[in-house]
Image (spheres, helix red, strand yellow):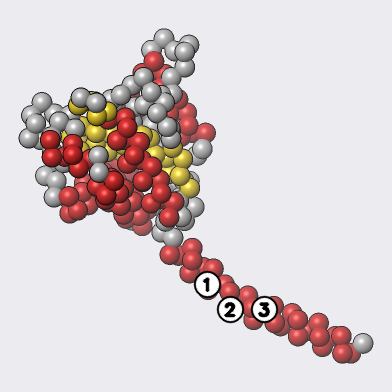
Amino acid sequence: MKKWKYFGLFFIFSLIILLFILYPKASAITNDLKLFGRIIFIDAGHGGRDSGTTHGKILEKDINLEISKKLEEKLVSEGAIVYMTRDEDEDLSSKWDERKKRGDLYRRLLLYKKYNAELYLSIHLNYGSNPKWSGAEVLYHPINPLNEKLGEILMKNFKEDFKTRRTLKKTDLYMYRNTTIPGVLIECGFLSNANERYLLQKEDYQRKIANTITNSVIEFFENTQIEE
Ligand SMILES: [Zn+2]
């Protein structure tokens, strides 16, 4: 009987030691994942019947989706839980919608609510009347005071990584003035600029954009207290 008692004690003791050994490793893994458990929505702009801006056969909606998929991959690798408003070539309007575009945007907003997103990132491309214009540009609506902060971090990092000379701007578009969770609209570059149009279609360049956005999101969460 006594022997079993000692064995039982030894077993419990070993279990405690094992927990002490394993705990730092488990917490080290979650500490390395800088976006662990963050719920982020990527909104790949346009899709389906809505191509967005175009240049010949090059469509904004396609490049938006490519960048969004790479961004999803990168955010997930940092531990984030990522949802996409679309992951193929479709728009979110219904055949019953009188105004298709408005219906499409409204359903994107409903998705944010349904999945309790903490942050949204709308991915788009620009088109300028002057073909010389180039560079990424971030736009925000002041409905949430954190939007400007996120926009500033993104713009700073785009300046560092891509040497863009564009600046943070405000937007009053329907979708952004109706979204209360933090988030911004990112115009990743100009389809109207020949050099940037070439680059935006390249996988490496799309990946570089995804990295800059991910690093900015990490910086944002490290410096921000989000109210639950
Ligand atoms: Zn667009």
Look at discs 3 and 2 and give the one toward the viewer. Answer: 2
What is the total number of numbered labels drawn onto the structure image? 3
Amino acid at circle 3? Ile
Amino acid at circle 2? Ile
Q: Which mark is residue 21?
A: 2
Residue at image x 87%, y 85%? 4
Residue 91 left/right relative to 165 = right
- Asked if residue 41 can be seen in this view, the reply is yes
Residue 153 left/right relative to 35 = left
Residue at image x 43%, y 55%? 77
Q: Which mark is residue 16?
A: 3
Residue at image x 41%, y 26%? 90
Q: Are marks 2 and 1 in contact (CB under 8 Å)?
A: yes
Q: Are marks 3 and 1 in contact (CB under 8 Å)?
A: no
Other residues around mark 3 within 10 Å, as few (<14) / some (14–19) / many (≥20): few
Amino acid at circle 1? Lys
Say which element carries label 3.
helix
x and y percentages locating residue 154 in the rendered image = 25, 47
The residue beneath circle 1 is: 25
Tell me: is circle 3 under 8 Å from ligand 1. Answer: no
Q: CA distance from mark 3 to mark 1?
A: 15 Å
Say which element carries label 2.
helix
Say which element carries label 1.
helix
x and y percentages locating residue 59 in the rendered image = 27, 28
Other residues around mark 2 within 10 Å, as few (<14) / some (14–19) / many (≥20): few
